[in-house]
Image (spheres, rainbow, N blue to C red):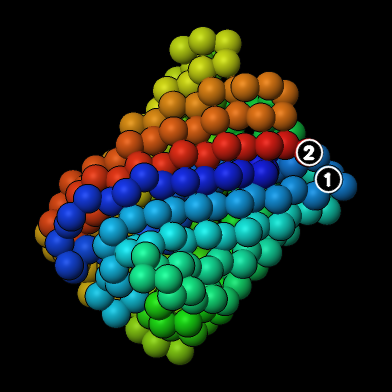
Amino acid sequence: MRRLAFALAALLLASPAGAAGFDEFQVFDGRIAEQGRPDLNIHLNAGRRGRLGDGGAPRNGLLATAELGYATAPWHEVALLLPFAREFSGDTYGGGFKLRNTFISPGAEDRPFAYGLDIEIRHQPARFSETDWALTLRPIIDLRTGPWQLILNPAVEVPIGRSGPIFAPAVRGVRQVAPVVWLGVEHYMDFGRFSRGEGLPRQAHQLFVTTDIKLSNRFALHLGLGHGLTHASDRWLGKMILSVDF
């Protein structure tokens, strides 16, 4: 299920200057929109962090992304993402674009096991990425049994024309606790380049506690509070996602 999302990340508290930067905190499951239906996602993230090292989206302000998606088949969805950032100083920066193609096993919502692959290519300036062009290959593994759901995204990021591929997996566990309420835990990781694995202090590990509430057949609310587990991670952060399905 692709969602029209309004996402707001709460202010990030003070954290180490060398922390790794994530420009979005999202785990992809095995669901997309119905065939022939467009969708729109609006992502907003706010924080007091400033630039993170030589790359990463600006955190000392507002990061917004408009995502336009369309399901061309029961197993495929394409999406165009247009990010921009506005710092608290008032400066505004365009964030280039991202193009995503998501391929999933048909009927994923009704299967105990679903799988897929999300392919993302992006072109972004230095304030958003360490290279102008980059490719992300994001496998999707979606397991469900009863009220439980486990989602794995063992993603590989490939900067084009510089450095080597980076292993940045994510995992999400969810349990339905009421007819319209789900509680979950999300873990976002960045282990560094395959050619030069980072030690634990230099790895980024973000742990979120989340809740999802289905407000109606079209609207849903996602809330999360996150904490960094290593020196190279954000200390505290939060997120809110309002989802609308067409």
Residue toward you, 228 or 170? 228
Q: Secondary structure at mark 2?
A: loop
Q: Amino acid at mark 1?
A: Arg
Q: Is residue 142 above or below residue 116?
A: above
Query: Which quadrant of the figure has residue 127?
Result: bottom left
Q: Is residue 165 above or below residue 176?
A: below
Query: Residue 140 at x, y = what percent?
Result: 54, 47
Residue identified by numbered label 2? 246
Residue toward you, 119 or 62? 62
Q: Is residue 157 left or right of residue 230?
A: right
Residue pictured at 72% horizontal, 23% vertical: 217
Residue pictured at 73% horizontal, 55% vertical: 69
Query: Marks 2 and 1: in contact by CB < 8 Å?
Result: yes
- Do we see residue 121 in this rendering? no
Q: Neighbour class for label 1 at 10 Å: few (<14), some, many (≥20)?
A: some
* Label annotation for residue 57: none
Residue pictured at 34% horizontal, 32% vertical: 209
Q: Residue lying farthest right?
A: 36
Q: Is residue 231 above or below residue 108?
A: below
Residue identified by numbered label 1? 37
